Image (cartoon, rainbow, N blue to C red):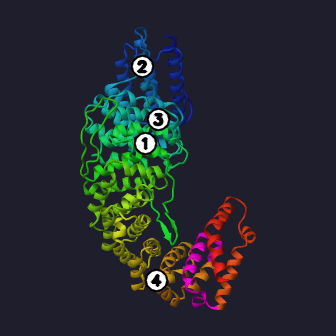
Amino acid sequence: FEISTSIWTLVQASVLWPGSAEASVDRLCDLCDRLHGALDEADLLGRSCAGRSGILGTLFRLIDLDSARLQLRIAELCLAVSFLCKWACVCVCVCVCVCVCVCVWVCLLMSPSLGRVGSRGPKRGFSFAFSLQLEVSGNNLLNICKLIFQISRSESNDIFFQKNSIIERFLSILPNEDVSTSGEALLYCVGALKFLSGNGTMVPLLLHGSCVAASQKLIQRLCTAENRSATMTGLVLVQLTAALRNLSDHADARPLFISSGMFSDLCLVLRLCSHHQDVCTNISRICRGRAWRVVGIDLRLCRPQQTLLLLGVPPGAGRHPRLLPAVCGGDEQTLAETGGSSTSVCVCVCVCVCVCVCVSARLCVVNSLYSASNGFDDHTLTSDLSCSRQDLVVRFLFTLGNLTADAEDARRRLFECEGGVGALLRLYKRYQRRGKEDEDVLVKLVRVLANMCTHPAVGPALAASEACVELLLETLALRSVQESEELLVNVAATINNLSFYQAESSALGRSGLAAVQLMMKLLLSTSMDAVLEAARVLGNLSRSEDVRSVIVQNKAHRIVVALLDSKSCEMCYSACGVLTNLALDPPTRVELSQEEAAAKLVDCLKDLGAGDWQLAGQACQALWNLLSSGPEEVLGEQERESLLQILTTFLDQEAVLGWVEHGDRRDFHMASWEVDFLPVAQKLVTFLQ
């Protein structure tokens, strides 16, 4: 009764408080806070309230008041008062609630400026925190979650979530409620979480709280529910994965997602909900974000073996790629890969993505599914990919491309994934003859193949694959650079990487002449990227005498010589590689001399050599081959002296050291000078002298 007297005194003070309407609201809000504190100190908050249901009924009738800010405090106060549930206090509690109602309505009448908030949601504060302290359930829980959802819809209300502990209160609902009995309440709760996670200032609060842990527990409960295909489960997962997508962009999310094993659970969701486009799309966006490609994270944190068991995939399956081509010329052969870095954190994700791509492409790639939670029986998962799912396939392939961009282990493990390569090739064949609107699938898919074949164990196998080589060459034959530049550049880069492996079993070697004809089409295009990739391919394939004959017969050597005038290090390096091989044949040397190839090589060495010793070395090798029949037949006296002067200058180690500043760049520069340039340059000088 002392507390009830104190409450009544505070209520009277708030009603009689002089000043503006806003001042009255402030006073009443302060009153709510003080009353809750008094109740908490008296240990009168708890679930063991005999009159709890009656009090809650009274409290919820007070929610729909006109002032958003005030009604939050009133709701908070009513919920706090409802905890005065010892039988001796029931009557007092009811009286207090009635008094509060009267006071509020008096204040509202005195303050006509307090209008109704718009449909996007009122500026409600944190009154529902005490509803959650009541541990409400059923309709009461639904009403509270709906209230939280309505408040979260307006970004202007986010400040109320930042200033108190309400986030932890409503997050506690996620792992403790069953979707079969409280599905709608969970839906409102995760919907609110999605809205809040869209605000950058809220993300750190969510991450530093229990958001990730609570979300993971809810995911695990949903995955082990008896009826996973229920509509409500799907709706909850859509909102929850959307919230996680928002959180995943923050740097602090990485260690939380990794150490908690969140990726394993997301993989399982993908497997169980492969039919649900929105869920798969959200998870693919989580996986593809650049935030995950960070070097130095312990692979063991990913728990890959556990993930593989959940996916029913042998423990050899792995991550995924990005695209940048290979360069070969003469004796120097280099595979170039795509830029970017992908971390070991993504091993389990890439396996999952690979599986989903295959499933989406009507492929049965997984024969069994194991769940550590409830011991599901083995079963086969197959799924159709409709046209509306194309964007999802593109996202998965994009993720595969990023993950294999700079990781040897990723390329190997993807290749070893049972049925993985076959699935990619069947998907390739399916989209091969589709229109321009479907081309993005091929762009991303070929990018995956390009990066996979840079692995020394994967490249020879793909180069020996008739199906793979035929699809790539068919793409070049069916499309033009003007309409499909990006795709054809990617295809040429893939062929370039495959052409590095010239074994007898190479399917590309057997199709080398056809490939050369198609590369010439790229050489004649206006796309410099396409021309560069074509030159790189010719640098590898021209090791074959038959290929060199075809190049000369089609006058393609003239184009290659002209590329030396491009003043581009990459272009000139590729051209030098082709010329190095072409100059092996005496008849071709005559053709090249007529095009003044030697003079152009000297100019290229002079202009670009000091900044790129690999290029300088390749130019010297090409000159060596061209001059092997006799320097006087190829170079005039003045050109010969000019070449000797350039080489003498470049062979002066002290002078070369002075061209580069101290640091790591200098060490690399000198190492390249010693390995790539010095040996061949010394031989060339000796020959000229």
State the CA–CA distance, disc 3 to disc 1. Answer: 13 Å
**Label 4 secondary element:** helix
Residue 153 visible at all: no
Camera-nearest label, 2 or 4: 4
Camera-nearest label, 1 or 4: 4
Query: Residue 234: x and y, percent?
Result: 30, 40
- Name which of mark 1 and mark 4 comes first in the sequence: 1
- Name which of mark 1 and mark 2 comes first in the sequence: 2
Q: Amino acid at mark 3?
A: Ser
Is disc 3 in contact with disc 4, using a CB cutoff of under 8 Å?
A: no
The image quarter in which residue 265 lies: top left
Residue 90 visible at all: yes
Q: The magenta stretch spans which residues?
A: 607-636
- Name which of mark 3 and mark 4 comes first in the sequence: 3
Question: What residue sits right under mark 4 in the picture?
Answer: 557
Main SS class of the magenta portion in the image: helix
Residue 609: in magenta span: yes
**Label 2 secondary element:** loop
Give the residue at the far top of this rendering.
88
Question: What residue sits right under mark 1 in the picture?
Answer: 244
